[in-house]
Amino acid sequence: MQKYHRHSIIAISIAQAFALMPVAVAQNTDQSVPEVIITGSKTLNTKAERSKVSGFIEAPLLDTPLSVTVFTQAQMQVLRIRKTSDAMKFDASVNDAYNAIGYAEQFSIRGFALDNSSSYRKDGFAIPGDASIPLENKERIEILKGIAGFQAGFATPGGILNYVTKRPTSTPLRSITVEASERGTLYGAVDLGGMSDDKRFGYRINAAGERLRSYVKGANGKRELISGAFDWHLTPQALLQLDLDYQHKSQLSVPGFQLTNGTELPANISADIMLNNQPWAKPVDTRNSNIGLRFEYQLNADWHATLAANKHEFRRDDYTAFPYGCGAANLYPGYCANGDYDVYDYQSVNESKSLLGTQALMNGKFATGSIRHEFAAGVSSAQRRDYFGDYVYDFAGTSNIFNPAVVPQSGNKTGPALLRRTDKEWSAFIQDIISLNDALKLHVGLRHLHIQRTELDNPGYEHSYLLPSLALVVKTAQNWSIYGAFTQGLEHGGIAPFGTGNENTMLDPAKSKQFELGVKADISRDLSISAAAFRITKPLEYTDSDNTYVSNGDAIHTGLEFSAQGKLTQQLGIGASLTSINARQQNTGVATLDGKRVTNVPSFKSTIYLDYAVPQLSGLGLNATWQYAGSKSFSPDNSVTVPAYHVLNLGARYVTQIAGATTTFRFNIDNTLDKFYWRDVTQSLGGYLFPGAPRTYKVSAQLDF
């Protein structure tokens, strides 16, 4: 009965899709991201044209004075993007940052780890990054690279990820996708959209179910999602929007590896080894729910107002047989030379986070003489409440990487969940894009932010900050722009990890600054390129020799980025992303840290994607992706580094008509050459190394009615 209940939502949605099947192709009402129709032997033109993630005024990407990457829904379909980790592989400025299978998807941008509490956004509102964010109900993923203090308030200086919700379609949409991959992972999703006959009411329904069988042996689980988005055109001037979603995911998490003997990379291991393999190990269980409400009113041809709110609830039961240290050699962190490691029973149940955000915004255009203004002003508020109990972290015994041993489970249980932390923020902000002439635009932004934090076990604080943003854009030609920008950012102080002397203590907020120069061009109607040079400086946080988590010195990241997106010919599409970063630790006064590379940041990384439509066979497309990452430092003193790696992915698709439905078959081989590599070498929780996935096959079918 329970199994039937888990999959009933998906079954009902698929049945509805067939029951309402019209022979029509949907056209999205969001004009900024045109729907892609797959026909003939042409390559897919999926590049985005506009974005709002760089501020509060939607603008063409060509005129945006910041580095922005957008993955449209069409790109997510073509590139087989099922989760955020899949998308981030195509942007060389993004890296994994303690991105463990079965746990939260966590990333760094420009070498700075994102903050789970503020760097992940849904329609501009902060949502927790403590669980995988569903993509089935997302129209696009927007990456703002670099400091986002003006746009988001609190956010680490790497940038933000913004997920834009799908909206109703103007004509009926019925789409079904099924997929099989890895060791029997099965996936199914349905996407339904349309409007009433009078065009006043629109709907978008998404549902998905997944049986998870990871390439890591034993990391099994399941996931279910249901979501809805609704538009009511109350009058020609007034639009009311509502969106809701709920996701449940349960999967056994996969711990990383530590250095053997405290000094050497683990040798002779395979990527499918599971260290969380005790018979009493339980899956990490997460439940996310979200409700968003937005009201837009067109005052006249030039001005409109928006009122919006978003409420997000997150709950998690966190379990793992956690591998850490070698007691026999008194080595913490690190595994014994023979592969032995200590096992700890970690439990933290009934964790929850509640976020409520509101925003009132006014947008408009006006002129002062010959100078034109695109203007936005607004206020926003955010409240966050974190609940958790005293966790269990008990030594259970010793196991071995190559010869696992069963150890007994702890008899202790976590304490009751209490309100541990409350954040209350409010902001007032203005943005003005000033057109001095046809070739010169000045972008000015300013946010005033007030934060009040209370904590159960630590003193709270209350502060106010000003966060400016200033940029100049020069249009050297209609399709070329050059920009220079200065921004300041603000991030919450880091929380001392468990095992440190000041465990769970939060450091004070820290300001950062960024200088950026860039150039963007639309080489043709279908091909865009961009390049940027940046320098970011922020206070450095680390665990010192006294085992205390401190803020001391600076992290200085200087880099170059290049990207290309679009079509080289009618048959050949391209996507390219290259990033070079010099990320250094400075001014700590510690000889083993000053001048050293920041951990888990390759000096050079690139991704190149090619898509070729075979002209001799209509509907057939071939694609290849080559990913390269240079060596990365694992230890803060740079005594241990992991080697560079190359990964080659190959794929094919075939589009045909079956019973009136446009059907797309896709087949992919990821890591075609079956290379072993270390994809993530974080210092989090004592320092862990995560292997990349071995060769993996994926096959899917998408039906659009």
Image: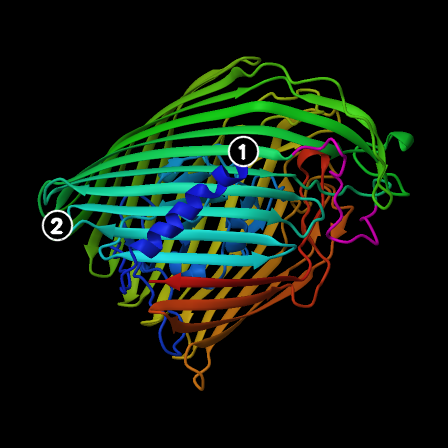
- Residue name at image x 30 percent, y 57 percent: 173
Determine whether the residue tagged by mark 2 lies in a helix, strand or loop.
loop
Mark 2, Cα crowd under 10 Å, few <14 / some 14-19 / many 20+, is few
Q: Disc 1 residue type?
A: Thr
- In this rendered view, identify the residue nearer to me: 238 or 471: 238
Q: In this view, does 87 lie above or below 303?
A: below
Let me know if residue 275 is in the magenta part: yes
Relative depth, front residue between 484 and 616: 616
Of the residues under marks 1 and 2, which one precedes in the sequence?
2
Q: Name the residue under label 1.
A: 286
Q: Which numbered circle lies on residue 198?
A: 2
Q: Is residue 225 left or right of residue 459?
A: left
- Magenta segment includes 100: no
- Whole-percent x and y of residue 109? 52, 47
Q: In this view, does 8 lie above or below 617?
A: above
Residue 658 in the figure: left or right of residue 598 = left
Query: So how many labels did they put on this image?
Result: 2
Is residue 291 toward the left or the right of residue 201 in the image?
A: right
Secondary structure state at the residue bearing disc 1: strand
Residue at figure coordinates x 30%, y 42% from the top left: 229
Q: How crowded is mark 1: few (under 14 residues within 10 Å), some or many (20 or more)?
A: many
Cα distance in 3D space between marks 1 and 2: 40 Å
The three-letter amino acid code for the residue at tag 2 is Asp
In-front residue for pair 287/163: 287
The relative height of residue 348 versus residue 218 in the rendered view (above or below) is above
Q: Give x and y (percent) for residue 623.
A: 52, 72
Tell me which segment is drawn in magenta.
264-282
Report the front residue among 687 and 403.
Answer: 403
In the rendered image, the residue lying farthest to the front is 1
Q: Quadrant of the C terminus?
A: bottom left
